[in-house]
Amino acid sequence: RNTRSSIDNSSSNTVCVDKKISGWCKSRDQSTAVHVGTRPCAHRSCRSRVAHSRVVQTRVCMALSSAAETSDAGKPKQVGAAVRLMITGAPASGKGTQCALIAAKFGVPHISTGDMLRAEVAAKTELGLKAKDFMESGALVPDDLIIDMLLARLEQSDVVEAGGGWLLDGFPRTDAQAAALSERGIEPDLVLHLDVPDEDLVARVVGRRSDPVTGAIYHLVYDKPTDEAVLNRLVQRADDTEEKVRVRLKAYHTHATKLLERYDNVVRTVDGTQDKAQVFADIESAIVALGAAQKSKKQMQQLGAMILGAPGSGKGTQCELIAGKYGLVHISTGDMLRAAVAAGTELGNRAKEFMDKGELVPDEVVIGMVEERLAEEDVIGARGWLLDGFPRTVAQADALGERGIVPDVVLKVDVPQEILVRRVVGRRSDPVTNKIYHVEFDPPEDEEVAKRLVQRADDEEHKVRTRLVAYNQYATLLEDRYAQQLAVVNGDQNKLDVLEEITAALDKTTAAKNNEKSIDRDDDDDGGSSGPTGGVGVGADAVEKGGGENKTSSSSSGQKETMSVNEFVRRAEEAFESGSLSVQDTNWSGQAGAEPARVAAGRSSYTDVLARPVLLAGDLTAFLAFAAIGTLAHRGDSSDSVSKGDVIRVALPFILGWLSASPLLGAYTSAATSSFRSCLLITLRCACVGVPVGVAVRGLATSHVPPAEFAAISIVTCTLLLAAWRTTYIAVAGPTTDGEMRRGGMLDGLSMITTLLRRW
């Protein structure tokens, strides 16, 4: 009503041009919409979610803006994002009163399952008629039927206009019902629990009375009527006796504990014994805090995900669950293509030309549709997107990358091929109801239904195997293309277990994005510099000589400060502890500019040798080299060749002496290779003990006391050979700290150079 006149006056072109609709189209907020294309209007006051012509959209929305300015004051309070709320509490805890206040304040549709059930029955919908059969027979309406009603309710326009937010009241009541909701992707952002002691609840219910004339509800203690005539005619409901109330409370508590445990991470308990205004004030603060957190999440992370899975892998089921759990927009390129063709958009018409000829739709057309879809309001305002069915080739993936469409995580639902064949080949459909069954995993209970089931032509085994071969060809290439983002989950298990693995992968990705954003913000605050991927640069010149702290350069010219090594290490440790960074994800050559810390040798033992096999092999080679040199020098000009047995016999006593002493002196601890200086000191210490022990063992073996010159030459030569080997080891493999955390050697440098060249 507010906008009609301004739109009429703005342009004669603002008319409804959809062939199926004549006249003006009114949405629930009384904004006029024009139906032409497929893109929802992005204007803030147009909540109809219908398509606007690009030609007339600007004029329509310009006219809407003036009306929106005058009507914003009466609108419900926005909390930053659509909120999905549940409210739970015992009978008489005040849920009904608070639901009315929440719905009015925040504009979320109040969905009471009792009211919903009665409305479906009254409207004689298919689900309502099914429910009526159970109700008339005195049986409880099955959970699956109520959940189907709820799913249908969540698709209604008032929920869509609220951005997908809702307030669910009266369901779930049990953990099983909550699990069933979770399977359908219905997860709350916040569960409000009104906590009232049982004795207070009993007093509230037992004192409740109703006026049979007016239907008004009173209470003998808290809300007594002032009119004596009204007081005299009040009656008590049969269910409001103390005995029945306590039975209902017992039933409530039986299920409430498990239900609250399931939603433990999103439950906010509110003291329901307070005045209703104070109860609502507590609820309001919780919802506003949730809205702020959601807004912050949007700013910190919008998750981009792709999903890969062969036919029969359960990919479609997981897409629904993921979208519901994380608030992602599920973008199926097949559905998107059909919708664009049906709507007659520019890209849809181009695609239709190829489809009519029986040709494949070119990549550029499909990618254009994907790009447009990702720019639409519902995607921009969501927590992220989930791309399903595209890309199918590396060329398509590269083309997406050129448009800036790069996923944060690529999920692969992995199922063995024979299991996939069993899943698809056993699939059957009911031609009457179109319901899908499986002859092995989900056969129909009704014999008559079983007899009329049919198999789709595409579900025959030879066709399934052909499709799997085609899928494996492109999936393998895509896995290589997205190797850095790939997360493989086991699809050969219960769908909720599959979802749990996917959840772990998505949570890890989200945590990494949050950590990356956090570092970026800290760098902006501190004047630090960060790379394009949010990594932190550490300059070697920033480290004070002779100290562990940092000298940061700052000047009035605005020169950026460099992060200290200590700060870099602190943040890295926090990332490891939070799980957003793991060893396999880390390129340790990034620390090559940092001064290696002095690491104490710690406790030494013979077991250290087992942890350093490469270092041990080099030490043994050094002693064999020493023995070969000594044997050749001893033979002099003799023409006799040196045998391997002679070399081993000479080296063996020194090896035994080294292995008996050096492990206890720290030769194989991380400190022994933590720096060149530490390496030389520990090698000298071990050689001065281990080599004399070897000389003594040789003397005992030969029954001859070695001369002092031989002992001195042996110590010096072995020490030099061992030091040469060990410094080479550090140069190639890099210095180590506790836990073999490498700081960057020649191999790391080569790896870093090849990585940079490949990226370049």
Image (cartoon, rainbow, N blue to C red):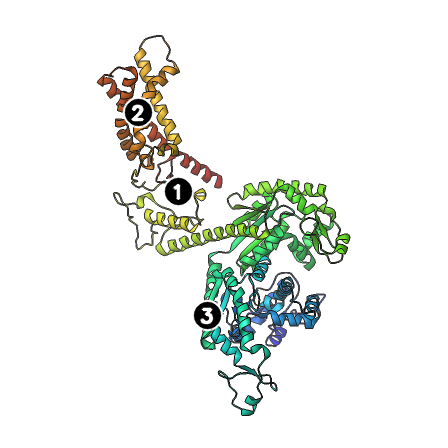
Three-letter amino acid code of the residue under disc 3: Val
Q: Nearer the viewer, residue 575 or 503?
A: 503
**Looking at the picture, how far across and down is residue 358, in whole percent?**
73, 47
Q: Earlier in the sequence, mark 3 or mark 1?
A: 3
Tag on residue 657?
2
Q: Earlier in the sequence, mark 2 or mark 1?
A: 1
Q: Is residue 237 visible?
A: yes
Are there few (<14), some (14-19), or many (20+) residues within 10 Å of tag 3? many
Q: Which residue is mark 1?
A: 590
Q: CA distance from mark 2 to mark 3?
A: 73 Å
Q: Which residue is mark 3?
A: 270
Q: Nearer the viewer, residue 239 or 416?
A: 239
Identified at 48% across, 61% down, the residue is 264
Q: Secondary structure at mark 1?
A: helix
Identified at 35% across, 47% down, the residue is 569
**Looking at the picture, how far across and down is residue 587, in whole percent?**
42, 42
